[in-house]
Image (tube, rainbow, N blue to C red):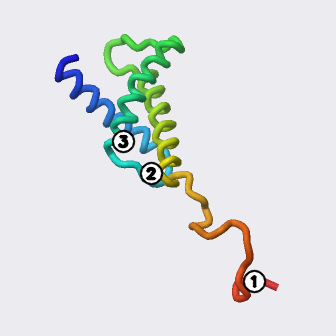
Amino acid sequence: MTIHSVFGAILIGLVIGALGRLVLPGKQPIPIWLTILVGIVAAFLGTALARGMGIPIDTPGVDWGELLVQVIVAALGVGLLSMAFGGGTFRRPTGGRPMFGRRSRLTRRW
């Protein structure tokens, strides 16, 4: 593997990871280096999945089907890591308050 292919993988990983992050709503609490790593892994896995599904990956120009599969894999990876890092997109909608339990006397409605 040459230095050009390493920089190419990092650049493609950055783009795929950023696109995967943009697909998810809300803010994800994972660092940028982890987004790049998810993007690099998603680029390799997405290419393998696209090839396995019969999507052409050796066409001249941009392979839109392969790119779509890579972005979906990156979005799944970013989503799973967001849950592991403490919420982010999948945070509880109550704003940190307990979902169940007693209300105080002042907020109780009669």
Mark 3 touches mark 1? (CB < 8 Å): no
Give the mark nearest the N terminus, 3 or 1.
3
Residue that label 2 marks: 28
Secondary structure under the numbered disc 3 in the rendered image = helix
Residue beneath label 1, please? Answer: 108
Q: Amino acid at mark 2?
A: Gln
Front disc: 3 or 1: 3
The reply to whether dot 1 and dot 2 touch (C-beta < 8 Å) is no
Question: CA gap, disc 3 to disc 2?
Answer: 11 Å
Q: Is residue 64 above or below residue 26?
A: above
SS state under label 2: loop
Give percent across and percent down for residue 1: 22, 17
Gap between marks 1 and 2, in whole Å?
34 Å
Query: Quick check: 13 above or below 104?
Result: above
> Of the residues shown, which amino acid type is indicated by label 3?
Leu
- The percent coordinates of residue 17 (x first, y second) are 38, 37
Which is nearer the N-term, disc 3 or disc 2? 2
